[in-house]
């Protein structure tokens, strides 16, 4: 599995645990939520500085993003309550 995929899955999991929608979460950074979706899908390779900022907002250790054991694959419901397809 690519490191971008591991980071993206962990980011999605931590964001989900924080009960933040993509729009709210990335609103804190003044970024488009579509950029976040691309990161969560493992399509974007970001800087360590940016990843560190994400970790601070989510209150996790930056190393947690790199841990494949923490990768979560299944989300029954989206934060807005709609079913995932």
Image (cartoon, rainbow, N blue to C red):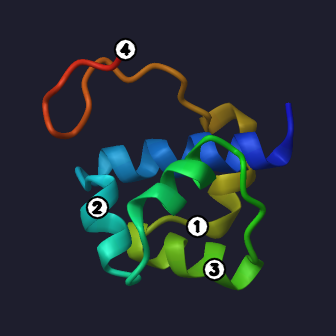
* Disc 2 to disc 1, C-alpha distance: 23 Å
| Nearer-the-camera pick, 62 or 50 | 50
Front position among marks 3 and 1: 3
* Disc 2 to disc 3, C-alpha distance: 17 Å
Instruction: Identify residue for label 1.
Output: 61
Instruction: Identify residue for label 3.
Output: 50
Q: Position of residue 63 (x, y in %)?
A: 70, 62
State whether residue 24 is above or below residue 77. Answer: below
What residue is rendered at 26% in x and 53% in y? 21
Q: Are the two marked residues, 2 and 3, in contact with CB atoms closer than 8 angstroms?
A: no
Front position among marks 4 and 3: 4
| Nearer-the-camera pick, 48 or 41 | 41
Instruction: Identify residue for label 2.
Output: 23
* Mark 2 Cα-neighbour bin, 10 Å: few <14, some 14–19, many ≥20: some
Front position among marks 2 and 3: 2
Q: Is residue 41 left or right of residue 79?
A: right
Q: Are the two marked residues, 2 and 1, in contact with CB atoms closer than 8 angstroms?
A: no
Q: Position of residue 53 (x, y in %)?
A: 54, 81
* Disc 4 to disc 3, C-alpha distance: 29 Å
* Disc 2 to disc 4, C-alpha distance: 19 Å
Secondary structure under tag 1 reads: loop
Q: Are the two marked residues, 1 and 4, in contact with CB atoms closer than 8 angstroms?
A: no
| Nearer-the-camera pick, 83 or 11 | 83
What residue is rendered at 28% in x and 61% in y? 23
Quadrant of the rendering where the N terminus is positioned: top right
Lower sequence index among marks 3 and 1: 3
* Disc 1 to disc 4, C-alpha distance: 30 Å
Lower sequence index among marks 4 and 3: 3
* Disc 3 to disc 1, C-alpha distance: 13 Å
Instruction: Identify residue for label 4.
Output: 85
Secondary structure under tag 4 reads: loop
Q: Quadrant of residue 33?
A: bottom left
């Amino acid at each position: 599995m690519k490191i971008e995929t591991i980071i993206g899955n962990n980011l999605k999991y931590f964001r989900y645990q924080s009960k933040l929608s993509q729009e709210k979460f990335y609103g804190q950074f003044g970024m488009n939520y579509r950029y976040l979706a691309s990161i969560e899908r493992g399509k974007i390779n970001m800087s360590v500085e940016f990843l560190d900022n994400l970790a601070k907002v989510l209150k996790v250790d930056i190393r947690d993003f790199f841990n494949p054991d923490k990768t979560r694959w299944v989300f029954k419901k989206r934060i807005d309550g709609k079913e995932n397809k």
